[in-house]
Image (cartoon, helix red, strand yellow):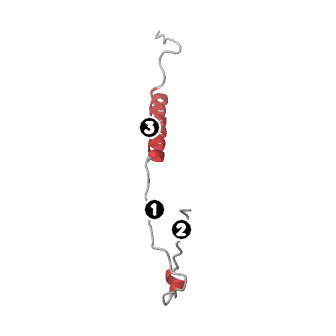
Amino acid sequence: MHRRRAGLAAPLPLLFLFVAFLAAIGYLVAASLVRRTAPVYPPSPTSRERRPNWERAGDTLTVDASD
């Protein structure tokens, strides 16, 4: 008869899931600390005209929120 010590041996899948959980948390923390860059567009002139067919291509509006 084989005897196991109670509480000393955790199942292997449980250990694997715990390590995967720690890796995911580490990735999320590291990704939140990395500074990302956003595309920057020049400010639009106040009296501008839209391109032809702008309805299909879309329109870009730049907001200066530095103040």
> Is 27 above or below relative to 43?
above
What residue is rendered at 46% in x and 45% in y?
33
Place of residue 53 in the rendered image (x, y in percent of width and height, measured from the top left): 50, 88
Extreme residue toward the front, this view:
67
Q: Amino acid at mark 3?
A: Ala
Marks 1 and 3: in contact by CB < 8 Å? no
Picture mark count: 3
Q: Which mark is residue 52?
A: none
Which numbered disc, 3 or 1, marks the residue closer to the eye? 1
Few, some or many residues within 10 Å of mark 2 (<14, 14–19, 20+): few
Q: Residue at x 44, y 55 (%)?
A: 36
Q: Circle 3: is it few (<14), some (14-19), or many (20+) Cα within 10 Å?
A: few
Kindly identify which residue carries mark 1.
38
Of labels 1 and 2, earlier in sequence is 1
Amino acid type of disc 1? Answer: Ala
Q: Depth check: 16 or 34 in front?
A: 34
Residue at x-position 43% and y-position 58%: 37
**Which percent across, then down, holds residue 26?**
45, 38
Q: Amino acid at mark 2?
A: Asp
The residue identified by callout 3 is: 23
Q: Which residue is mark 2?
A: 64
Q: Residues within 10 Å of mark 1 (few under 14, many from 20)?
A: few
The percent coordinates of residue 34 (x first, y second) are 43, 48
